Amino acid sequence: MIIIAGSMRFAAADRDDVLASLTEVTEASRGDAGCVEYFWSEDLDAPNTFRFFECWESQALFEAHLALPHEAAFAERNLGRMTAATATTYEATAAPLPGPGSATRSASR
């Protein structure tokens, strides 16, 4: 599983169009093959900075997503007007959280 997390910052004047483009790319991306999770949120401490979190079943499916027309349209519409950006990629293995009675959960409460 591949996780990508980061942020993009834009000028305040671009806010309305950025929000529209984030809505469009989110709706399209959530339907892409291999998408486990995909969302954007605004950083409460940094206006016009939008944080993203994506989770994909595999690197190949993530790369296929990047090649789709809605990703290209998002990039063309937004990359030139970003004022800052960050991104980090992680590899993860899905694992259930320990539940009540699990041997890995602490007995003291």
Image (cartoon, helix red, strand yellow):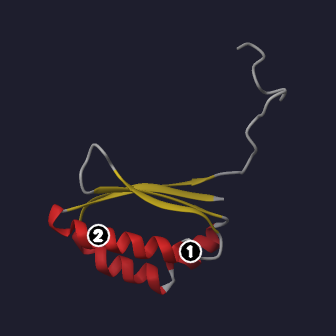
What is the spatial separation of the Cα atoms under label 1 and label 2, in whole angstroms? 23 Å
Q: Is residue 22 above or below residue 6?
A: below
Kind of residue indicated by mark 1: Glu
Q: Is residue 91 above or below residue 69?
A: above
Secondary structure at badge 1 equals helix
Secondary structure at badge 2 equals helix
Label 1 crowding class (10 Å Cα cut-off): few <14, some 14-19, many 20+? Answer: few
Residue visible at 40% across and 71% down in the picture: 23
Name of the residue lying farthest toward the bottom: 69
Q: Quadrant of residue 20?
A: bottom left
Residue visible at 83% across and 29% down in the picture: 102
- Residue 76's label in the rendered image is none
Residue visible at 51% across and 82% down in the picture: 67
Label 2 crowding class (10 Å Cα cut-off): few <14, some 14-19, many 20+? Answer: many
Name of the residue lying farthest toward the left: 13
Q: Quadrant of the C terminus?
A: top right
- Residue 18's label in the rendered image is 2
103 and 27: which is toward the camera:
27
